[in-house]
Image: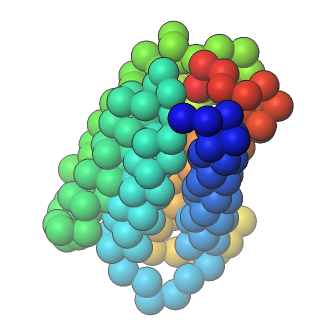
């Protein structure tokens, strides 16, 4: 591969990771605004957001270097959680909660493993992403109701949307910021350990 061809390939990788980051941040905003929606079938919308975000993260993972498999796996786990919600939207609330907790915990473990292979600020953001997902899972497991905060800010909302919208939004936001930092490091430092 020539130097010009390699530089062009690297620019394309950076663009793809940046576009993925922006799309995930937009989905985070959409998830955060879900409590404002009326008559929205919560599990289908949440599942669709997880599925779409998972596919975008999976695509961004294909552009990574040393963490490719782990980043693609994190995206696949997110997409799978979304698919399970979409295919079975009428599950009991506790099963849905455990599905979200399992997704967050598994994604946290994958991101923690990815942090051991990343370097510099990308490592820091990978750890932040893992810690955020772990923290959100523990909040759900502890039974602390984020729904109370949502209802206080937005008024009465469907239970599922109020329970999980901001969980998804926070996880997606940190994932998007992590991908933006990855693209920035690639742009500034060339092929770094990402």
From this viewpoint, which residue is outermost toward the top?
116
Q: Nearer the viewer, residue 164 or 155?
A: 164
Badge count: 0
Q: In the picture, residue 143 is in which quadrant?
A: top left
Q: Position of residue 75 (x, y in %)?
A: 39, 45
Q: Which of 15 and 97 is in front in this view?
A: 15
Residue appearing at x 17%, y 66% in the figure? 88
Q: In the picture, residue 33 is in which quadrant?
A: bottom right
Q: Position of residue 127 (x, y in %)?
A: 60, 21
Which quarter of the rendered picture does the C terminus lie within? top right
Q: Position of residue 166 (x, y in %)?
A: 58, 55
Residue appearing at x 51%, y 41% in the figure? 63
Left or right of residue 54: residue 194: right
From this viewpoint, which residue is outermost toward the right?
188
From this viewpoint, which residue is outermost toward the bottom?
39
Left or right of residue 52: residue 116: right
Can you say whether 1 is above or below 100 in the image?
Answer: above
- Looking at the picture, the colour scheme in use is rainbow
Can you say whether 171 is above or below 105 in the image?
Answer: below
Q: Position of residue 146 (x, y in %)?
A: 56, 50
Tell me, yes or no, if residue 138 can be seen here: no
Can you say whether 53 is above or below 46 in the image?
Answer: above
Which quarter of the rendered picture does the N terminus lie within? top right
Can you say whether 130 is above or below 162 in the image?
Answer: above
Q: Nearer the viewer, residue 80 or 15?
A: 15
Tell me, yes or no, if residue 126 can be seen here: yes
Residue appearing at x 33%, y 54% in the figure? 79
């Amino acid at each position: 591969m020539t130097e010009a061809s390699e530089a062009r390939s690297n620019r394309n990788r950076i663009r793809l990771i940046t576009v993925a980051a922006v799309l995930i941040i937009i989905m985070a905003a959409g998830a955060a605004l879900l409590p404002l929606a009326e008559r929205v079938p919560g599990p289908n919308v949440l599942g669709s957001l997880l599925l779409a975000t998972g596919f975008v993260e999976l695509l961004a993972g294909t552009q990574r270097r040393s963490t490719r498999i782990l980043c693609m796996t994190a995206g696949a786990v997110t997409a799978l959680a979304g698919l399970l919600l979409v295919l079975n939207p009428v599950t009991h609330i506790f099963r849905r909660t455990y599905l979200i907790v399992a997704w967050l915990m598994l994604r946290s473990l994958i991101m923690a493993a990815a942090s051991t292979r990343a370097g510099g600020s990308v490592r820091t953001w990978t750890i932040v992403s893992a810690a955020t997902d772990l923290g959100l899972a523990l909040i759900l497991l502890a039974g602390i109701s984020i729904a109370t905060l949502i209802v206080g800010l937005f008024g009465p909302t469907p239970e599922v949307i109020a329970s999980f919208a901001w969980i998804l939004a926070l996880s997606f936001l940190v994932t998007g910021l992590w991908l933006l930092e990855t693209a920035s490091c690639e742009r500034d430092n060339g092929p770094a350990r990402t």
